[in-house]
Image (tube, rainbow, N blue to C red):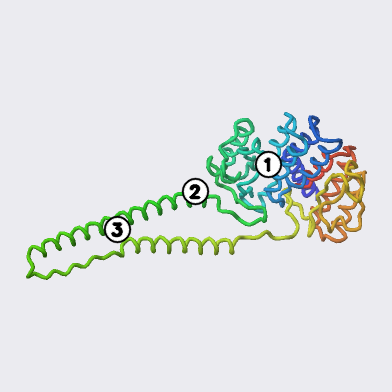
Amino acid sequence: MQSKAILLSLLIAYAEARFGQEQEPISAISAVTSGGGPGVAATLAGGAISTLLGAANPCAKLQAADEIIAKLGTGADAVAAAIGLVAAEQNFNPFATDIPSICGDPTLPATEVLRGVVPLVDPAVTNSATENANSAKSKTAPFNAKGLSVAQVMVNNGFTSLKAVDLSGATVDVKAGAAAGANAGTNTGANAGAGAAADAAVTTAAAAAAKTAVAAADCPPATVFVTVTMGAAAAADTAAANAGNNNANNNANNNGNAATGNGGAQASAGGFDFGTCTPTMKFVGGLGNRPATEFTFQAIDPVVALGQQEALNPNIITNRICDQLTNVCNAGASGKAACLDAKAQILALGTRDASTAAKWNSLLGF
């Protein structure tokens, strides 16, 4: 029993130390004072918490960064906070997967000052040292991102241990763009060469025919039959068209076979068994018909939040989450114990802001 308690403490300590850093951008967002109305920065900070969870679509984080600039302006602190969010490491569970999901949408982020910034990745990921060095560099010296997604920028700069997805969650082949360009150039050159060769053949044949015709005029008794084949250029064009059709069909098939995300509870990076629920918490304004400037706590998982009103006191929500793990989520012993430990820490912490929700999530491995 004692060994289990020690193991649980170690897991909690690991989760807190490892994943607390992923919440660092939240405090920077809430601290922006250069722009935005009262409570706007805090609202954006509260909303950004969910974009750092492992189950979140990585493109959502980039949209949140764009929103920071749109609503808080381009003051130095707002820009730094937005860049920090783009560069932030999204929660990653090495027990469930070995590569992170990265946004493969080339239109995001839309704000120019945020483009070319690439995120940190978990040290457990292959070649993470290269990417994390790139991330640190990109915050002050962004990479070339013209027409490229964040995932493509990462690949172009030496990091390929990733899964690129679009806003729908479908997998994107970030190498396809470069390959398509190369193929297009190759096909164009090949087609042009084939066309030139065909035209040259036709010209040569025509010249030969003309020369033969002159010879025939000089020697009337002789009858000369000349056959000129004009189909070479057409054949080259037809081959190119067929290749294009094949590529289009392949692309359509690939799009049809694109992977889709699965529902269900998000795995905890601490290895805790939370059953069918994800016990994360948010801190946002405007819940329950409250004013947008009034911030409250609430469970993110709708199953956990069902029947529970949002609360100004985070301890009400943490208590609800732990109860639901037992009552409806079928959580295991490790999940229940981790929740009770985190609940005690939040109570002792005594804060009531976005950092409270971030702390709770990190304690549970999210």
The residue pinned by badge 3 equals 198
Does label 2 or label 1 sit earlier along the sequence?
A: 1
Q: Amino acid at mark 2?
A: Ala
Does label 1 or label 3 sit earlier along the sequence?
A: 1
Distance, label 2 to label 1, CA atoms, is 26 Å
On the image, the x and y values in percent for residue 229 come to 26, 65
In the rendered image, is residue 20 in sight?
A: no
Q: Amino acid at mark 1?
A: Glu
The residue pinned by badge 1 equals 89
On the image, the x and y values in percent for residue 239 come to 38, 63
Residue at (46, 60) in percent of width and height: 244
Nearer to the camera, 237 or 309: 237
The residue pinned by badge 2 equals 178
How crowded is the residue under tag 1: few (<14 C-alpha within 10 Å), some, or many (20+)? many
Nearer to the camera, 244 or 316: 244
On the image, the x and y values in percent for residue 88 come to 69, 39
Does 224 sit above or below residue 334? below
> Circle 1 sits in a helix, a strand or a loop, which is it?
loop
Image-based side of 125 in relation to 333, left or right? left
Q: Are marks 2 and 1 in contact (CB under 8 Å)?
A: no
Does 109 sit above or below residue 265? above
Q: Nearer the viewer, mark 1 or mark 3?
A: 3
> Circle 2 sits in a helix, a strand or a loop, which is it?
helix
